[in-house]
Image: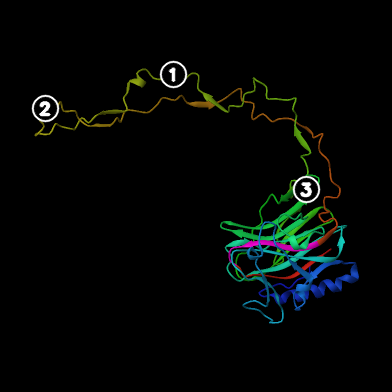
Amino acid sequence: LILTEKSFSNMAGMKSVILALALLAGVDAKVYFKEQFNDDKWESRWVASTFPGKSASDMGAFEWTAGEWYGDENDKGIKTSQDAKHYGLSAMMDKSFTQKKDLVIQYTVKHEQKLDCGGAYIKIGSKADQKSFSGDTPYQIMFGPDMCGSTKRTHVIFNYPAKDENLEAKSEIKCETDQKSHLYTLHIKADASYEVFIDEESKQTGKLEEGWDFLLPKEIKDPKESKPEDWVDAKKIADPEEVKPEGYDDIPAQIADPEAEMPDDWDEEDDGEWEPPMISNPDYKGEWKPTMIDNPDYKGPWEHPLIANPDFKDDKNLFQRCKDCAMIGFELWQVKSGTMFDDIIVTD
């Protein structure tokens, strides 16, 4: 269950969310991680990283601020503060957890700088070296907006150990691109379905199995079957009774202009033999083609018979997208800084 304010014009709206979730604790709700950035000790909970192969000068710093505009100056978040920089920041959860039922990941994003190219997504994974947390660090869930040029999407990427791959959602979810605060919510349900919300509005919902390529197909084309050689799949054929008219090919595409006359000042001794200009022949009908008629032998498109895929393996725990999750973080690149993050919560 997600309880939120209806509007998030600034970061202050999330306070009611945390309160509501706290009240839900009495009905067996578990908060795995919560961060509101409202105290100056936030840096003691988060660790900045330097990406492997990069120097400290390549890394940008997060600024603790209420932003350029706000509803409450004491309601602060963190903001990217340097252009054309990488950003690495992570925090450990109080203890690791393995998803047993629903899982909700939620946070707010505000692009004060009119972001044109950069990420604003969040990652959740197992315990790792925070000082080197980067794009090379394994993760289990990556969620949130990413923009560059014409690409403006909300990532929902799951690592699937059975394939050892990070799987992007097959259907793209657009992200918000204005300068307002927006609430991004990913809800993974115990029945192996999911739903993505932006500002409480559902943007995509469905079954995990259908939204990502976790599993092999249940059915495959029968390798022992092939289209019969005598299968007729041509809907139309040339009318066999129609014959090209006699002399059809003798009609030229162009003819000499019958109205053209040799100029009075044309001298054939000096100018050569005069030839009238050519014009399109009104009697020319183009290449002859017979009339197409319905094919009496047409059988329709051949459909390859399907059989059960012998390699298909179901996954009864497909909903379990977090196993021994213990760390959350931002691993970003931004051309133009000014993105704010606030009110992060991971709960069931």
Which of marks 3 and 1 precedes in the sequence?
3
| 283 magenta-colored | no
User: What is the magenta range?
Assistant: 327-336
Main secondary structure found in the magenta portion: strand
Label 1 belongs to which residue? 243
Which of marks 1 and 2 precedes in the sequence?
1
Amino acid at pointer 2? Glu
Label of residue 209 in the image: 3
Label of residue 168 in the image: none
**Residue in front for this viewpoint, 86 or 182:** 86
Residue 1 makes an appearance in the image = no
Q: CA distance from mark 2 to mark 1?
A: 46 Å
Please give the name of the residue rendered at 86% of the width and 48% of the height, measured from the top-left corner: 316
Of the two numbered discs 1 and 3 in the rendering, the one whose residue sits closer to the viewer: 3
Which of marks 3 and 2 precedes in the sequence?
3
**Residue in front for this viewpoint, 305 or 99:** 99
Q: Position of residue 270 (x, y in %)?
A: 10, 29
Q: CA distance from mark 2 to mark 3?
A: 84 Å
Question: In the image, is 275 to the left or to the right of 22?
Answer: left
Please give the name of the residue rendered at 68% of the width and 82% of the height, measured from the top-left corner: 73
Q: Position of residue 315 (x, y in %)?
A: 84, 46
| 332 magenta-colored | yes
Amino acid at pointer 1? Val
Label 2 belongs to which residue? 268
Question: In the image, is 92 to the left or to the right of 243?
Answer: right
Of the two numbered discs 2 and 1 in the rendering, the one whose residue sits closer to the viewer: 2
Per the image, label 3 sits on a secondary structure element best described as helix
